[in-house]
Image: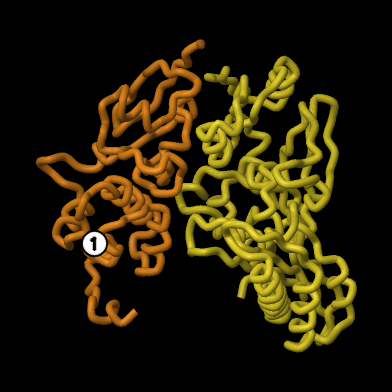
Chain colours: A orange, B yellow
Amino acid sequence: MDKIKIQFVLNGETRQVEVEPDLLLIDLLRERLGLTGTKVGCGEGDCGACTVLLNGKNVNSCLLLAARVNGCEVVTVEGLGSYDKLHPLQEAFIAEGAVQCGFCTPGMLLSAKSLLDVNARPTREEIARHIAGNLCRCTGYTKIINAIEKVACADRHCACSREAEEGR
Amino acid sequence: MPFVYHAPRTLENLFATLDSLEQYSLLAGGTDLIVKWKEKLIDPKAVVDINGIAAMKGIEECPHCFSIGALVTHYEITASARLRAAATALYEAAGEVGSPQIRHIATIGGNIVNASPAADTAPALLALNAEAEIQSRTGISAILVADLFTGTGRTCLKPGQIISRIKVPASGQNQGSAFVKFGKRKALAIAVVNGAAWITIDGDKIKDVRLAMGAVAPTPIRLLAIEDWLRGQTLAASTFKTAGTMAEKLVRPISDIRSSAEYRGDLARQVVIRALETAARRAKGGCACG
């Protein structure tokens, strides 16, 4: 089977790789390039554990042929922050207790980033709607939404009233 | 079995590629295709990735209509203020498909060609009287989206034919449309029943109307008998209620893992009532999106 040469920007770095026609993006990232932060869950686009950003938008990497990212920009959780300098969303997830088993967290963080990049001040409902494709079986979502809201509020220096929100 | 991958960049190259292949699957968003392939429901010898074809992209506004590229994603539809205002049912349906991740990738052309009886954009396109542009090496023709479906998972497209664009009439003065979906949850739910209504009003009367419904038959369907009855009726809750009862009697849904046939009948009634009410309110309000 002929391999396909692709070039794409991965976490800010231009990469050139040869891929089989039936290689999925998730397998390219995890097995070939060693980026195991992106998780394999259902493999059918239902759980969102495999979420990455494709040209800034959250997508399921388990449903994308690797060949399709030719010429595109891909961001995985490894491109979000580093051990020395966490992304504000990662800081907020820790501070708010939004991480339990952690399996959904990489995808959750990237879905949150794709939302805040286009909507800096989302409502709680908008946050919930935007992470609807990311399943979490531990937290019950409340703390995850709190964490995302915290970053949205910090960015805008707004006085965000948690008491008011809890009434919803 | 692995497949050969083709990625033509123009329609001309696409048709040349299709001509050279014995058997192929077209790859647009891939959110249905890749799942079917993983589950070994399909085993394509060749996958033709059409995502590079510019002629199948973009939302263009023509006089009194929109031309939507088959590769336009559900996300792009939900981001269009013009579609929200003048093709409201489609805007609403696109926002109900899958999840944000799916909507960023999945295309309107794929949603139609996949020919699921429960496809969310289908009832909206039927109610809006949308046409699909069928293109092949030999030329281009148009067909009502309503006439495209021949059975569950089947369309009248022949090998070598593709849908390149979808033409959606724009709603104007005294017109409105609405989409209603019942699913088991708010995201990633295949519709138990969905439906859409388009209405033109004249004072307090219904001048013209189209009603469509999904997941109650092998294909998305128009409810023509109810439309006939509704024309000329007065805009009133009792009219919509009668139309709903007619729908419950008219449709012949099946029982499956998502619902019993009986419950689908109940939902069909509610879908018709709610879709008509909302579409009528929008037609009266002057603003299609209210």
Figure check: A141 above or below A33: below
Residue positioned 74% across, 61% down in the render: B170
Residue positioned 26% across, 33% down in the render: A36
Residue A39: tell me if it is visible: yes
Q: In this view, does B111 lie to the left or right of A80?
A: right
Residue A71: tell me if it is visible: no
Q: Residue lying farthest left?
A: A84
Residue positioned 65% across, 66% down in the render: B179
Figure check: B277 above or below B184: below
Picture coordinates of residue B245, whole percent (x, y): 76, 79
Query: Which amino acid, by three-letter code, is at mark 1?
Result: Ala
Q: In this view, does A113 lie to the left or right of B103?
A: left
Picture coordinates of residue A152, whole percent (x, y): 28, 62
Q: Is residue B32 left or right of residue B163?
A: left
Residue positioned 77% across, 28% down in the render: B159
Chain letter of disc 1? A
Figure check: B246 above or below A148: below
Q: Residue lying farthest top?
A: A2
Q: How many labels does the image show?
A: 1
Closer to the camera, B3 or B11?
Answer: B3
Closer to the camera, B187 or B245?
Answer: B245
* Quadrant in which residue B81 is drawn: bottom right
Figure check: A131 above or below B288: above
Quadrant into which the C terminus of chain B falls:
bottom right
Picture coordinates of residue B80, whole percent (x, y): 58, 57
Circle 1 packing at 10 Å, graded few (<14), some (14-19), many (20+), is many
Quadrant into which the N terminus of chain B falls:
top right
Disc 1: which residue:
A147
Picture coordinates of residue B190, whole percent (x, y): 57, 56
Element assignment for label 1 = helix
